Amino acid sequence: MSLLGIGRAARDIGGAVTEVSEVFTVNRTKAEMATLARYEAALAQAGAEFQQGSSGWFDRFVNGLNRLPRPIMALSTVGLFAYAMSDPAGFSVRMQGLAYIPEPLWWLLGAVVSFYFGARELNYFRGYRANIPPAFVAGRPVIQPQNGANSALVDWLNSSK
């Protein structure tokens, strides 16, 4: 038998052993490639979902409405101070009227405002995290040892995150 024949036989035996071993354990390379393919497909689907062509008048109108709550709340707060200074009697009557609003309704208003601004903040936070430099690991900075720093302490701080 020639060396070429022995090489082919060894390759065939190696392939058979690989196929048999994959029955008992997962081939990590193939599993990681499948995971990557699923991730890329999900990313492509999400990207296609948020691609917009030219928006119509209704889309522009709704986008304009979405930008109104913060300026309205800020200007209304300033307006309350102006109203309190211009008509103190009327202001106090209206503030007494607020005292008659039931507490669950205040909780509901607080939840709506919190969820609106919380979701908005989370959206910006996620966008910010997409631009984090590689010196950050899992959203936390990696501490670099300085001159005279205890390197064991730095390693412990980095591993405890």
Image: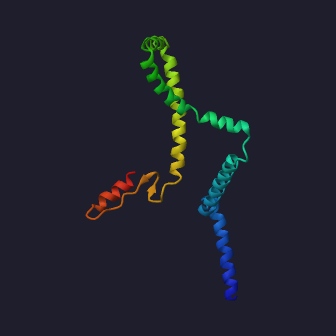
Q: Residue at x 37, y 52 (%)?
A: 160
Q: Residue furthest front?
A: 86
Q: Position of residue 71 (x, y in %)?
A: 53, 33
Residue 96: image quadrant is top left
Q: Is residue 36 left or right of residue 57?
A: left
Q: Residue at x 52, y 41 (%)?
A: 122
Q: Is residue 105 left or right of residue 3?
A: left
Q: Residue at x 62, y 64 (%)?
A: 21
- Which of the pair 147/36 is nearer the observer? 147
- Coloration of the structure image: rainbow
Q: Position of residue 108 (x, y in %)?
A: 53, 22
Q: Is residue 70 above or below residue 23?
A: above
Q: Is residue 72 left or right of residue 142?
A: right
Q: Residue at x 37, y 56 (%)?
A: 158
Q: Residue furthest left?
A: 148
Residue 29: image quadrant is bottom right
Quadrant of image for the N terminus: bottom right
- Which of the pair 153/136 is nearer the observer? 136
Q: Position of residue 77 (x, y in %)?
A: 47, 26
Q: Is residue 105 above or below residue 146?
A: above
Q: Is residue 22 above or below residue 139?
A: below
Q: Is residue 72 left or right of residue 2?
A: left
- How many dots with numbers? 0
Q: Is residue 96 above or below residue 9?
A: above
- Which of the pair 108/22 is nearer the observer? 108
Q: Position of residue 132 (x, y in %)?
A: 49, 54
